Amino acid sequence: MPRTPREKSPTGIYHIIMRGVNRQRIFEDHEDRQKLLEKLFKFRGVSGYRIFAYCLMDNHIHILIQENKEPLSRAMKRLSSSYVMYFNHKYERVGHLFQERYRSEVVDNDRYLLTALRYIHQNPLKAKMVEDVTSYRWSSYNEYFNDGYLVDKDFVLELFGPSREKALAQFIAFHGEINDDKCIEIEEPRMNDGRLKEIIRDRIGMDASDIENEDKMRQISILRKLKTIDGINTRQLSRLTGIPYIRVWRA
């Protein structure tokens, strides 16, 4: 069945989400997060896109972006492919890291641009990872107050006020407002253990608990196949098979 074409933004601006396949972590340490930002900066020179906001969470990324010289799909493919190559080499793993198709929504006016901006910056706050948006290191919020190199600050700040001082004051106030902002979010299908055991048995013709009795190469082949099941995650697969988490993760 063919995929539904993405809606085209009249402004060229989109809120996109790139998520780890089956909720897998895409960052293991600060070096990984910094590497992703470096690549986002590097490929900006190739693709010409503009970044207005970003937030790196453990298993997904939010980016508020405007496409330019090339289609956004091509730019995101370049970014994800380059990062996956780095990640797989560093952690001695193979296979997919990101869900195959990133999610996106059209940002077609200034009001929704600011809504998406706040939603992205408040993601760690709403996930209860921090108590204040200023405390999260891996979002673009603090770039608006320093010499950060990635975000196009002027475009956004002009929407808040004529002078930089007033604009920043309004920027802070806007992020502090109580809100119920709704934007696209990652889809998190979940599957209970009983149902997953049935699916594994149907897929490979054996019980999940028997997989650890197979030789190493056969285990890897089976695990790669099972990791494509929508709704499964690495920790759950490790628990059901009895195979150590790190081996499942690397498969």
Image (tube, grey):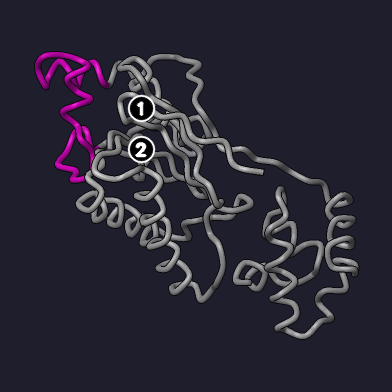
Q: Nearer the viewer, residue 228 or 135?
A: 228
Q: Quadrant of the C terminus?
A: bottom right
User: Residue 135 has which mark?
Assistant: 2
User: Residue 189 has which mark?
Assistant: none
From the viewer's perspective, tell me whether residue 250 is left or right of residue 85: right
Badge 1 crowding class, 10 Å Cα cut-off, few under 14, some 14 to 19, many 20 or more, is: many
Residue 80 on the magenta segment: no
Badge 2 crowding class, 10 Å Cα cut-off, few under 14, some 14 to 19, many 20 or more, is: some
Q: Locate residue 14: give its quadrant.
A: top left
Sequence-wise, which precedes: disc 2 or disc 1? 1
From the viewer's perspective, tell me whether residue 54 is left or right of residue 215: left
Circles 2, 1 touching at the beta carbon (< 8 Å): no
From the viewer's perspective, tell me whether residue 210 is left or right of residue 153: right
Q: Nearer the viewer, residue 142 or 65?
A: 65
Which stretch is magenta?
Answer: 143-171
Identified at 82% across, 74% down, the residue is: 211
Instruction: Single out the residue that lies furthest toward the bottom.
Output: 215
Identify the element where label 1 is drawn.
Answer: helix
User: Residue 117 has which mark?
Assistant: 1
Percent x, y of residue 184? 52, 29
Amino acid type of the residue that numbered disc 2 sits on in the rendered structure = Ser
Residue 164 on the magenta segment: yes
Percent x, y of residue 83? 40, 61
Identify the element where label 2 is drawn.
Answer: helix
Identified at 40% across, 68% down, the residue is: 86
Amino acid type of the residue that numbered disc 1 sits on in the rendered structure = Leu
How far is disc 2 from disc 1 in space, using C-alphas?
17 Å
Is the residue 152 above or below the residue 239 in the image? above
